Image: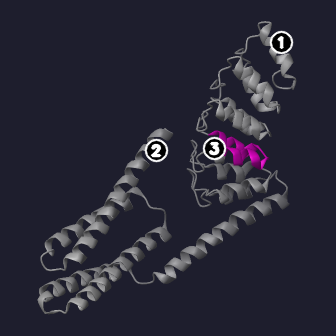
Amino acid sequence: AAAHNENPEIIATLIKAGADIEAKKTSDETPLHEAAAWNENPEIVATLIKAGADIEAKDTSDETLLHRAAAHNENPEIIAMLIEAGADIEAKNIYKGTPLHVAAAHNENPEIVATLIKAGADIEAKDTFDRNPLHEAARWNENPEIIAMLIEAGADVNAKSYDGKKPLYGAKENENRDKSKTISIINIINKNNNLIKKTRALFTEKNSIPTKTRFKLISINILVAICIGLTIDYIPSFLKGILSLLILSHLAYQVTMINIKYISEKSTTTKRRLASMGIDFILLFFVAIVSDYIPESIETVMAFIISVHFIYQLFAIIIGFFKKKLKK
């Protein structure tokens, strides 16, 4: 009745007559599991929840009501209702797949995926096999719109599973999907991938100076600042400001271009952040050493910029650490 009967009065009558709302099938599915998966009338789900049905009940595959609804139900109202009732949007099944994983793989209604993303589902959640929702969609879903939606939401088209496979590989691997749909999916992924490559090429073109050379230029900036400090009493006041501005601007530009190169090459890892913090520490040390020889304005601004960058990297590492812990 919970799965296929769309009359809430029937459900209410059965409950009133003493029907067990937590009765389980062979695979431990409860009536609310069945309603969430197959019944498109929100009132049925609402009736069971109101009667006290367990919103976090799991079957033998550790799938919650939200997993089942995300995989099979095409009514986004059901998804929204379960989330509002307290269903865990990041719950994991035995393969560590989230509701977004199963929706991306099996549900052809884009509104289901959109509802989960809007509610805050992690677009880059990894299952046991290190596959994200885009991997699942590319491999199994028949609707190209799902792939386009995930990419638009920020899914990484170059994410690799445990065996090094990207979503594009999964798209080509599905032999049962209509060829025209497969081609459409491959084109969507390739289009986004080409955009990434063009962006990286643009960064590379503008960042053709080797990083070592940029660090040398930064060192020259510091030496020039020292020279200004030594001759500060002999430089006209208006010229002090101009020279300070030029040195500061050039220093900021070189540091920015170094960071752009790192970003264009790959995503920032913890090791890169720690290395960046090490460079910040060395620069702060240098500023402290030469503080008596450089104009106070340059010293203050340099120390402030370096300190802010150091703190930013530290917080990014801490936040990343806790995110990983919470996912586990």
Please report contact status of discs 2 and 1: CB closer than 8 Å, yes or no.
no
Q: Earlier in the sequence, mark 2 or mark 1?
A: 1
Magenta segment includes 43: no
Residue at the (57%, 41%) spot, across then down: 128
Q: Which mark is residue 324?
A: 2
Q: Residue furthest front?
A: 237
Q: Amino acid at mark 3?
A: Ala
Q: Is residue 103 magenta?
A: yes
Depth check: give the residue in front, 233 or 32: 233
Residue depicted at x 82% and y 17%: 11
Toward the viewer: 182 or 57? 57
Q: Which residue is mark 3?
A: 119
Question: Considering only vertical position in the picture, is 61 above or below 323?
Answer: above
Q: Quadrant of residue 199?
A: bottom right
Task: Give the magenta-colored segment's residue range.
Answer: 98-116
Residue 154 at x, y = what percent?
61, 58
- Please report the residue visible at 22 percent of the width from the left and 86 percent of the height from the top: 224
Marks 1 and 3 sit apart, C-alpha to C-alpha, by: 33 Å
Q: Is residue 138 above or below residue 67?
A: below
